[in-house]
Every structure is written in C-alpha cells, then in structure tokens.
Amino acid sequence: MPRNGQNARAPARQPRQRTLPALKEGLPRPVLARVESLPAGSWTAEHSHPWAQLSYAVEGVLQVHTATGQFMAPPERAIWVPPDLPHEVLTAGPAEMRSLYVRADALAGSPLGLACACRVLDISILARELILAVCALPPDYDEHGAPGRLVSVLLDQLDQLPTAALDLPLPTDARLLRLCEALQADPADRRTLAQWGQEIGLTERSMVRLFQQQTGLSVGAWRRRLRLLAALGPLEAGAKVSGVAAGCGYASASAFIAAFCAEFGVTPAQMFARA
C-alpha cells in the first residue's frame, strides 16, 4: 500500500516511535492486555503478529493503516486487527490506549476469528468495563479460574459489538491512489471530478466506475468521509466546531454538523461526550 505520505511523515514521528513487546514465545495466556499512555505523534512501524489485536481508545484518537484502508477510533471505539495482518498504528494527539492481544485459538469459530480485515467496533458500556477489568489482570492470570471466565465473557461480548463506519477504504489502482493521497493532503480541495480526471489521466466516467468498484464508495462519499474523519482529532482535542468545519471545507458549522450526523449517526458533541 502506498503509505499516504509515510516517507515524508515518518521522520517527524520517528522520535516518538512506539516499541512493541517482546513476545517471541507467543502469548502466555489466551488474552494479554497492554496499557499505554501515548504522546502526540506516537507511531508504530508497519508490523504483523500471529495473534489478533484490539486497540481501544479511552482518550484520544487512534489510527491503524493497512494495505486496504485506514481505520480510526475516537474514544469509546476500538480497532480490531486480525492475526498476521501488516498494519501501522499512529496517533496525531496524545492518547490513552488499551490493547488486547488475543491468541488465534481463543477465537476459533467466532465471528471475529473469521474476520480477515480490520474493522472499527462501537464499544458498549459492558465491553468497556470488561476491557478495563482484563487490563488489570496480571499477564499470568489463572485461565481456569475467575480471571479466565472474565476473559471468556469479554471475548463473547466483543463478538456482539456492532461495527462503525470509521474507516477509509483505499483503491488499488495507482491513478486512483494518487487522487486519494492528494485529497488526504488537503481534505478541503474543491476540484471537480472532471478536473481530477485530467490530473490523473482517467475519464470522469472511468474514474467513477473504478473508484466505486475498488472502495465500495462513490468518490463524493469517500471525500465526505475523508473530511469528517480528518475532523476527529481536532474535535477530540477541543477545537471549535466552526474552525474544524472551515478546515474541512464546509461553508458553515451547521452544514458540517449535519454531514457529521448523517455519516456517523451522532453529532460531534455526542461522539466526544465523556461517559
């Protein structure tokens, strides 16, 4: 996957590169929890591991990049990463992250165990409390006692969580990727499809058809989601809606809020309300 500016971006993040735990022998239990307070600009280089991972945002906005798209988790959401999937993790601002590493055998036959792509999950109040409780367990918890039963309940709850449309799928066509990278660099870009077609060497009709085939979204829907996802970090940091709206190319705060609610089902205030 083109890393959407990774080569230019990585040096700025390099001083805050996040380290990975040394788990050469695998996970000692079906689930291993990791508690992290991440400074702004934290970055984990692309990597993979034989276990699944749930990255839960207590505070801040987490991002996971893969070859097929980008996934974002504001507070009370989490990103599910299947086993053996190369991925990169980053945060623009500071974040409180709770990670659960889950052995593949603990997922046998479950919906999440069958998942082969990342997804963003809406975390319920029950799932949140279970995640925090499991994060308080020692790495060598008694998997046959009460702690093991707690972990089993958590895994069962994770299977029942709904997905959230907080992902940005990427096309495979190199010309369309050029379009996506340019729009990611400037979400407020207002060039028309015809202008973009001339820029990347595709007719407008071909561009529309290929983009829909490869991402499942129209170009317009993709651009709208890009703009709204780009707003999550500033909103979580407390920026004024009017300023965020203007930075994302919206003429007014009310137009931005309406688009945000239509895309995500909640207003910005509701998404970032503290439980």
Image (tube, rainbow, N blue to C red):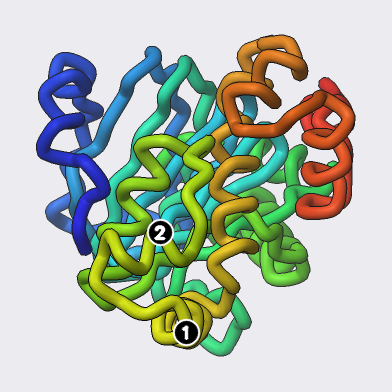
| Residue positioned 74% across, 48% down in the render | 123
Q: Nearer the viewer, residue 217 or 175?
A: 175
- Rendered location of residue 159, percent (x, y): 69, 70
Q: Is residue 73 above or below residue 15?
A: below
Side of 174 where 243 appears, left or right: right
Q: Which residue is mark 2?
A: 195
Q: Nearer the viewer, residue 143 or 37?
A: 37
Query: Split into 4 quadrants, where in the image is the C terminus?
Result: top right
Q: Is residue 170 above or below residue 228?
A: below
Query: Split into 4 quadrants, where in the image is the N terminus?
Result: bottom left
Residue type beneath disc 1: Arg
Sequence-earlier tag: 2 or 1: 2
Side of 90 where 232 appears, left or right: right
Q: Is residue 1 above or below residue 21?
A: below
Q: Nearer the viewer, residue 205 or 153?
A: 205
For disc 1, the neighbor class at 10 Å (few under 14, some 14 to 19, many from 20) is few
Q: Nearer the viewer, residue 189 or 130?
A: 189
Residue type beneath disc 2: Gln
| Residue positioned 70% across, 26% down in the render | 245
Q: Which quadrant holds residue 151?
A: bottom right
Q: Which mark is residue 205?
A: 1
The Cα atoms of the two marked residues, 2 and 1, are separated by 12 Å
Task: Look at the image and tell me whether residue 111 can be seen.
Answer: yes
Task: Look at the image and tell me whether residue 52 can be seen.
Answer: no
| Residue positioned 35% across, 37% down in the render | 185
Side of 155 where 266 appears, left or right: right
Disc 2, disc 1: CB below 8 Å?
no
